[in-house]
Image (cartoon, rainbow, N blue to C red):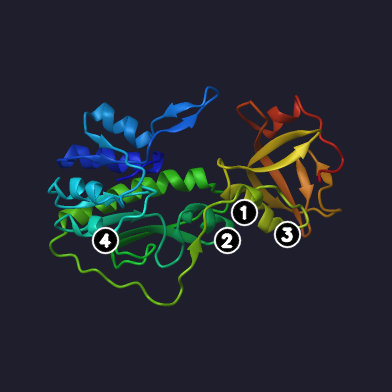
Amino acid sequence: MGTPEFSVPALDALAAAHDVVTVYCQPPRPAGRGKKDRPSPVQARAEALGIPVRHPGSLKDPAEQAAFADLGADVAVVVAYGLILPQAILDAPKHGCLNIHASLLPRWRGAAPIHRAIMAGDIDTGISIMQMDAGLDTGPVLLTETTPIGPQETTADLHDRLAAMGVRLIMRALDEIATLKPVPQPQSGATYAAKIDKAEARVNWARPASEVGRLIRGLSPFPGAWVEIAGERIKLLRARETDGQGRPGKVLSGFTVACGDGAVEILEAQREGKRPMTTAELLRGLTLPDQID
């Protein structure tokens, strides 16, 4: 049960080692210039593997719950599915529903744990294999693995590493499922990784350089932190903090911009309708103003 690209490596590994009776994902969504319905990455991959796919808009319907129970599954593996699982779904498989969650629970429960960990300046994160219950990422944890967050890592970088870690850990969990002991999450230390609001994405140069840099890396590549230059929205994809002082938003040199405290050097950016570019490539076709608001 999964939907985005993050879920695909787990699907591939499960299909190679186990009998995946059915794949659940969210329904196709309008995408592209023609706004035609496009299947999710998980649906596309499952269909390529010849695995039956279901994409109900909700699992609250008793008929949907009965159809799920009729699969007779030993376990459901859930990774970035995006739908609430009612108790009847949680209870149907013999070993319940196991979730691959991209944080060290109870920190960063919720929809955007990778983004939030980088934006908050966490020094490490990881994968938790959780036995799902009716709460929001509140179930007991079966296995965890930790990884450091590099000082220049973006959400895209961390996403790929965590997806691979999730595969290793869920395969181990399935191998050891009869002997693993669920550990309740501690009451302290819980934080919530709210879905990214696009209103968060505009860069505020008055903030400290450390915060601006984390925002840029945490929102890269989607939805992308951005600034407006000559009426064009420019996505900022990679950045590092550096020395420098000036009025917030002042371009000090190249694409180094003063912040409320310190400065940020933009390393990679993307113009509207263009591919991501290094700063050197970008500046060959774009003249920066003295001040970026």
Q: Position of residue 126 (x, y in %)?
A: 40, 58
Disc 3 to disc 4: CB gap under 8 Å: no
Crowd class of label 3 (few under 14; some 14 to 19; many from 20; radius 10 Å): some
Could you tell me which secondary element the residue under label 1 belongs to?
helix
Element type where label 4 sits in the image: helix
Mark before the other along the chain sequence, 3 or 2: 2
Q: Which residue is mark 3?
A: 208
**What amino acid does circle 1 point to?**
Arg
Instruction: State the residue at coordinates (42%, 43%).
Output: 160
Residue 240 at x, y percent in the picture: 66, 49
Q: CA distance from mark 3 to mark 4?
A: 45 Å
Q: Is 147 situated above or below 222? A: below
The residues tagged by marks 3 and 1 sit, at their Cα atoms, a distance apart of 10 Å
Query: 141 or 263: which is nearer to us?
Result: 141
- 166 shown above or below 132: above
Say which of marks 4 and 1 sits in front.
4
On screen, residue 97 versus residue 39, left or right, reads left
**Amino acid type assigned to the residue bearing label 4 in the image:** Gln
Label pair 1/2, CB-CB below 8 angstroms: yes
- First along the sequence among labels 4 and 1: 4
Distance (Cα) linking label 4 and label 1: 38 Å
Q: Is residue 206 depicted above or below 46 in this figure? A: below
Mark positioned earlier in the residue sequence (4 or 2): 4
The picture places residue 262, in percent across and down from the top left corner, at 76, 57
The residue under label 4 is 87
Image check: 257 left or right of 93? Answer: right
Q: Which mark is residue 214?
A: 1
User: Given this view, does label 3 or label 4 mark the residue nearer the observer?
Assistant: 4
Identify the residue position indicated by label 2 in the image.
Answer: 120
